[in-house]
Image (cartoon, rainbow, N blue to C red):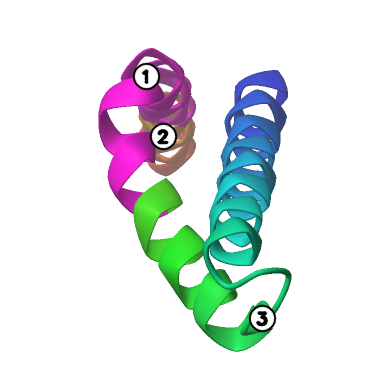
């Protein structure tokens, strides 16, 4: 579960940081007037695209742990059928 929370926390942190940058740039360009809806949409898309390369290691670690857990569950089910 640690890898899940690490990955999720980093995704949220990346989104918040991206939102702060997008809203800051938008406010700078429009003299303080920010369209929050579009800033939210742009930051969501930007953080989505940046998360793939930036968080690859954490995502692979999480996937590997899920694979191990799934393999254990399958083995436990098979051993239960043999009894």
Q: 78 or 39: which is nearer to us? A: 39
* In the displayed structure image, the side of residue 29 where residue 70 appears, left or right: left
Residue named by callout 2: 70
* Depth order, front residue of 58/47: 47
Using residue 5 as the reference point, say whether residue 47 is left or right of it.
left
**Magenta segment, prevailing SS (helix, strand or loop):** helix
| Distance of label 1 from label 2 (alpha carbons) | 10 Å
Q: Residue at x 40, y 27 (%)?
A: 59
Vertical order, 3 against 25 (above or below): above
Q: Which residues are magenta?
A: 48-69
Identify the element where label 3 is drawn: helix
Question: Closer to the N terminus: mark 3 or mark 2?
Answer: 3
* 38 part of magenta stretch: no
Label 3: few (<14), some (14–19) or many (≥20) C-alpha neighbours in 10 Å: few
Give the residue number, with chain letter if any, for mark 1. 64
In this figure, which residue is indicated by the disc labeled 3?
A: 36
**Mark 2 burial class by Cα count in 10 Å: few <14, some 14-19, many 20+:** few
Query: Circle 2 sits in a helix, a strand or a loop, which is it?
Result: helix
Among the two numbered marks 1 and 2 on one chain, the one whose residue lies closer to the N terminus? 1
Q: Residue at x 62, y 84 (%)?
A: 35
**CA gap, disc 3 and disc 1:** 38 Å
**Percent from the top left, x then y, of residue 60?**
34, 20
């Amino acid at each position: 579960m640690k890898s899940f929370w690490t990955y999720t926390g980093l995704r949220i942190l990346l989104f918040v940081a991206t939102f702060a940058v997008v809203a800051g740039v938008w406010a700078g360009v429009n003299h303080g007037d920010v369209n929050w809806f579009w800033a939210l949409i742009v930051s969501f898309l930007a953080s989505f695209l940046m998360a793939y390369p930036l968080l690859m290691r954490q995502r692979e670690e999480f996937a590997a742990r899920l694979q191990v857990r799934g393999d254990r569950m399958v083995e436990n089910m098979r051993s239960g059928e043999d009894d």
